């Protein structure tokens, strides 16, 4: 992992990793998270890996553990309306930049999962969740946070089964879009299917 390589050279080096979730979703916000790690945090990281490789229960356990530790992290969101107005790439950049900015002190090395931002001398890592504890942990924190948001939305917009699909384009979700059209949290600049196209 990139942290181990840094800490082999300098155990005082602080590492920030950032990631986002929800970029490809058809509804709801995009959420970014950043995590700052120090060498002494290593014992808390043994089961940390890409959020997609963990069960929802395991992700929640990890977030609870980190929340109860002294590990610093930050979360940023961009709504579907911001995405529709400014584009998904700009929203992606915004949540990553804001989440890092909240915990950055100019002493850290910053790694971003598969996305380039100009600030913080940040380094983009391909498949960052597999090569950085901080990025993997950021992906877990962002995923748990966004899943809770989408589950709350499911009670407001029950037709779309957001508690199951979290806004992603599953067959079930697309069928509901065809039947009901988009709701106020759908990203209208995304391809939502024939129903929306007819309404434009």
Image (cartoon, rainbow, N blue to C red):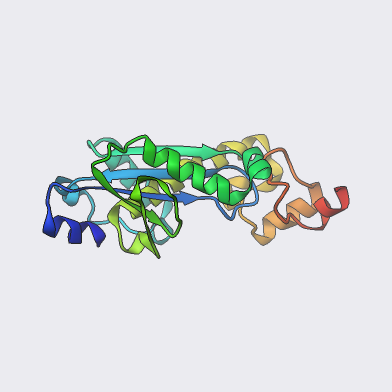
Residue in front for this viewpoint, 135 or 163: 135
Please indicate whether residue 69 sits to the left or right of residue 138 in the image: left
Q: Position of residue 104 (x, y in %)?
A: 31, 38
Quadrant placement of the N terminus:
bottom left
Q: Position of residue 79 (x, y in %)?
A: 60, 38
Q: Residue at x 40, y 51 (%)?
A: 139
Q: Residue at x 65, y 57 (%)?
A: 169
Residue in front for this viewpoint, 138 or 64: 138
Please indicate whether residue 28 sits to the left or right of residue 108 in the image: right
Residue in front for this viewpoint, 198 or 44: 198
Q: Residue 112, located in which quarter of the rendered image?
A: bottom left
Please indicate whether residue 138 sits to the left or right of residue 80 in the image: left
Q: Position of residue 3 (x, y in %)?
A: 22, 56
Number of residue marks: 0
Q: Residue 175, located in which quarter of the rendered image?
A: bottom right
Q: Position of residue 194 (x, y in %)?
A: 82, 58
Farthest right residue in view: 198
Q: Residue at x 33, y 58 (%)?
A: 49
Please indicate whether residue 155 sits to the left or right of residue 144 in the image: right
């Amino acid at each position: 992992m990139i942290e181990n390589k840094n800490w082999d050279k300098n155990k005082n080096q602080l590492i920030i990793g950032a990631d986002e979730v929800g970029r490809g979703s058809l509804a709801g916000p995009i959420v970014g998270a950043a995590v700052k790690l120090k060498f002494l945090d290593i014992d808390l990281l043994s089961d940390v890996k890409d959020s997609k490789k963990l069960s929802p229960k395991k992700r929640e356990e990890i977030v609870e553990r980190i929340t109860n530790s002294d590990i610093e992290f930050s979360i940023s969101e961009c709504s579907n309306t911001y995405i529709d107005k400014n584009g998904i790439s700009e929203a992606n950049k915004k949540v990553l930049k804001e989440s890092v900015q909240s915990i950055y002190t100019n002493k850290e090395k910053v790694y971003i999962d598969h996305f380039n931002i100009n600030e913080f001398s940040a380094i983009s890592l391909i498949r960052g969740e597999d090569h950085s504890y901080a990025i993997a942990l950021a992906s877990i924190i962002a995923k748990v946070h966004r899943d809770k948001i989408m589950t709350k939305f499911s009670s407001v917009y029950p037709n779309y089964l957001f508690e199951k699909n979290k806004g992603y384009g599953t067959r079930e979700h697309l069928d509901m879009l065809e039947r009901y059209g988009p709701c106020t949290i759908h990203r209208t600049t995304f391809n939502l299917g024939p129903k929306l196209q007819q309404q434009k």
